[in-house]
Amino acid sequence: MHNFEIKKLREELGLTQLQAASLIHSSVRAWQQWESGERHMHQAFWELFIIKTKHTERENGNMSSTIPTITLRDLKKAHYGLAVSTHSIEQVNAGSSQLKFIDLFAGVGGIRLAFEKAGAACVFSSEIDIHAQLTYYTNHGVVPYGDISMIDADAIPLHDILCAGFPCQPFSHIGKREGFKHPTQGTMFHEIVRIAERKRPKVLFLENVPGILNHDNGNTLKVVLDTLTDLGYKCNHTILNASDFGVPQNRKRFYLVAFQGNDFNFSFPKPPMKKSDIGNFLEKGAEGYSVSEHLQKSYLFKKDDGRPIIIDRNTKGPIKTLVSSYHKIQRLTGTFVKDGETGVRLLTESECKKVMGFPSDFKFPVSRTQMYRQMGNSVVITVIDAIAKNIYEAISQNKGAVDKKPESAQAVSLDLTI
């Protein structure tokens, strides 16, 4: 955006630099630098200014449909402003949607893809890792807010579904040590609770590792269920394996779907038990992912114990769970492919997307190490697709309950403040 265009539009609207800057949550100094040409105004800020002033460029549909490029440097320098501006645009676009959801502990947005496919619109997202924020923005056009514990629940828009994949933490010991009134305080689950308590979404969708069933001798799950029940939610939970849904990866995960009240007819999808062979998903002659011959001799195959697991295009069945530390080339837990320049390689980015159910056009504007971390920390979208579909059907059958907003859930403007 040229500096003279910025100044011209501001003057046409009769705004001072202070008034214009306040509209997009920037400083007056930044606006002055944009007008003088000292700094370049990011497209996201310009589009937010267009929305806030209801300028004819937006009304005529001439706004660029492409997502402006944002870099890690941009996120480090202006994360909050970019989060505000991109969320404002998103919330305008989601205004007519019948179902809205928020995406907490969002990662790269795997859960988001599934719920959007089911027909819902995202109005808020939060993710603390800056590399995941970049990948999220690149694919969804929105910069997630950061640390959820720093965000006022009143600043989060009304929504029908709260989605979150939260860390598994012990509650009882933390509560006893810190003297908290409630055992969830001091944990990430407590952030879900405080938002649900304030905004009262009709549905909670939570994802976790299967170990939550026995974590802290079962106390962790008990506290989760008791807390949500006390808030008026009816909880349904199960363990599903991605390999039962046609995904070539053994990946069991815990899923919890909680509805406000007993008026919703919901059940988890029954696995189609559709098995897939990983060999059918492997590339041939992939370059750039090879494990060096030295590392193979000195580490990977230093013992004749059947480790690590080596697969090829003839391998049947699914692979083991893809973990976030896959890039470390661990001989006991890793799965490697018989292929590449040195004869043994890591899974490619494309193969990782296939075993996680991600679309082939999903982009990773990060290093390979970060790509493996993000994939290992993500969800298998194929499974979430099936759950989200059943949630949507349950809501559709009882739409009146969704339309009725509880008195405690206060509407907010597009301006989110921390």
Image (spheres, rainbow, N blue to C red):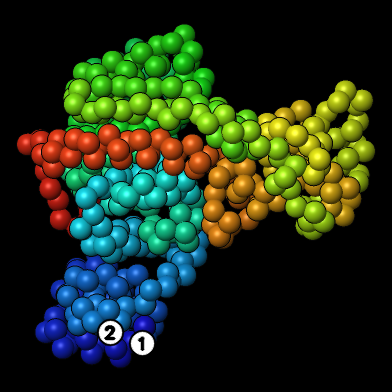
The quarter of the picture where residue 311 lies is: top right
The residue lying at 38 percent from left, 31 percent from top is: 206
Label 1 element class = loop
| Residue 20, placed above or below residue 89 | below
Determine which residue is flagged by label 1: 2
- Dot 2 amino acid type: Ile
Q: Type of residue at label 1?
A: His
The numbered dot on residue 99 is: none
Label 1, label 2: how far apart the Cα atoms are: 7 Å
Vertical position of residue 257 compared to residue 283: above or below? above
Picture residue at 62% right of the left edge, 47% below the top: 354
Crowding at mark 1 (Cα within 10 Å: few <14, some 14-19, many 20+): few
Circle 2 residue: 6
Q: Nearer the viewer, residue 230 or 61?
A: 61
In front of the other: 247 or 335: 247
Percent x, y of residue 377 = 54, 39
> Under tag 2, what secondary structure?
helix
Q: Is residue 64 left or right of residue 88?
A: right
Residue in the picture at 92% in, 38% down: 297
Count of residue discs: 2
Give the percent coordinates (x, y) of residue 337. Answer: 79, 43
User: CB atoms at circles 1 and 2 under 8 Å apart?
Assistant: yes
- The residue sitting at 18% across, 40% down in the picture is 399
Residue 47 versus residue 407 in the image, above or below: below
Q: Position of residue 17 (x, y in %)?
A: 19, 79
State left or right for residue 57 relative to residue 74: left
Report whether 304 appears left or right of 158. right
